[in-house]
Every structure is written in C-alpha cells, then in structure tokens.
Amino acid sequence: MSSIAAGEIKRRGMGVLDPLLKKHGEATVTIRGKERYVVLTREAYARLREAELGQAVREARADYRAGRIADRSIASHLKRLDHEL
C-alpha cells in the first residue's frame, strides 16, 4: 500500500491520490508521519464490504448449526425474556 502525507493532499488537492489509487487501489494518508486513514477506490471498498458480509453470513450459519441461534417466534422469545428477567 502506498502512503501520502495529509499536507501533500492539502497542497495539491485530492487529485494527488489518483495515481496511487489507480496503481494500488488504496492509499494510506499519514499525519505527522503516522498512518491515520486509508483511502480506497469504490471497487476496492465494494470488495471489502462483500468479503465482510460473506464472513458474517458464514459466522451466522455456523452459529445456527451449533445451536447458538434460537429458532423461535417473536412471541415465544419475548415470553422467554420475561421469564428470565
């Protein structure tokens, strides 16, 4: 991943990110030498979100198979909560 100083963006504008994003799909913005932000292309962001959502679905399915998710109606769930509290 390539990085650029925030001051450079301030001086040259957001267009300074274009070459970095075209080459790498992402860039790190540094402030006082410390990495603070990541800028992504829309396509890279969409891939990241898709991967996150896919992982969430896999985790939910694993929880369901392991019995960690109750398959009940809302009414029975509320009744169980009343009983437990």
Image: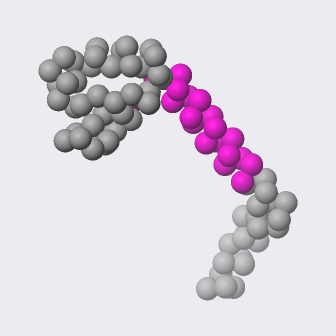
Name the residue: 82% across, 67% down. 67
What x and y, as percent, mark residue 9? 22, 24
Q: Is residue 78 left or right of 17 when viewed as pictured?
A: right
Q: Is residue 83 above or below residue 34?
A: below
Q: Is residue 42 magenta?
A: yes
| Image quadrant in which the N terminus is located | top left
Q: Can residue 66 be spotted in the picture?
A: yes
What x and y, as percent, mark residue 36? 31, 42
Name the residue: 74% across, 49% down. 58
Q: Which residues are magenta?
A: 39-59
Scheme of colours in the image: one colour
Q: Is residue 8 above or below residue 52?
A: above
Q: Is residue 56 magenta?
A: yes
Name the residue: 76% across, 61% down. 63
| Image quadrant in which the C terminus is located | bottom right
- Where residue 18 sits, quadrant-wise, is top left
Q: Is residue 81 above or below residue 19?
A: below
Q: Can residue 72 be spotted in the picture?
A: no
In the depicted view, which residue is nearer to us: 64 or 8? 8
Query: For the stretch drawn in magenta, what is the main secondary structure?
Result: helix
Q: Is residue 20 above or below residue 62?
A: above
What x and y, as percent, mark residue 34? 27, 44
- Where residue 50 sits, quadrant-wise, is top right
